[in-house]
Amino acid sequence: MSQPPDDTTPAGTGPPDRQTLRLLDRHLTADALVAETTFDPDSYEPRLLQALLDAERYPDSVTSARLDIRWFTTGDFSVHYAEAHDDGGRWECRWDRHPNAHNARVHFHEPPSATDVSDLELQSCHPLDVYSTILTAVEQRVATLWETASESSSS
């Protein structure tokens, strides 16, 4: 699977919010969908929280899946979801909140390539609300993958 998006920070996002990254880590490690979490560069000075998702929860065609989370003291964030498939393909999307010239401050990079961008409305930008929104979307994605795999095997 490819590396997370580069560590370039959009202007105005501020420094990493280590407390929020650690909070999200505690929630992710308790989630059954998550196999393991790691901090980059380490847990003392985290800039990136990476959650490797349990490949056993996906159909065989998905070889790996992960979330890359960046959170900043300004409340800005970037959460990138990426899947790798056995045919070499990728499926990815990203939820962002940061100053930019292309869309609203809160926006979504659409799957399957995360290239197309649309404005996004969130009820709340509190880290746990964003976490809940994203994990729900990932669970829906996993369910869709299983439905597709089931349809393919029955035809």
Image (cartoon, helix red, strand yellow):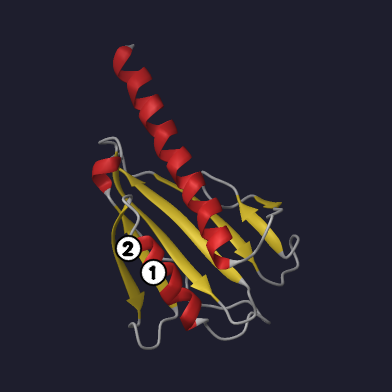
Residue at 72% across / 65% down in the picture? 105
> How many neighbours does mark 2 have within 10 angstroms: few (below 14), some (14-19), or many (20 or more)?
some
Rendering coords of residue 96 (x, y %): 61, 63
Image check: 52 left or right of 133? left
Per the image, the residue denoted by label 1 is 25
Report the disc number at residue 126.
none
Residue at 55% across / 56% down in the picture? 94
Residue at 31% across / 13% down in the picture? 154
4 vs 59: above or below? below
Image check: 1 left or right of 136? left
Per the image, the residue denoted by label 2 is 29
Do labels 1 and 2 touch, CB within 8 Å?
Answer: yes
47 vs 50: above or below? below
94 vs 13: above or below? above
Residue at 40% across / 63% down in the picture? 27
Residue 5: in sight, yes or no? no
Residue 133: in sight, yes or no? yes
> How many neighbours does mark 1 have within 10 angstroms: few (below 14), some (14-19), or many (20 or more)?
many
Separation of marks 1 and 2 at Cα, in angstroms: 6 Å
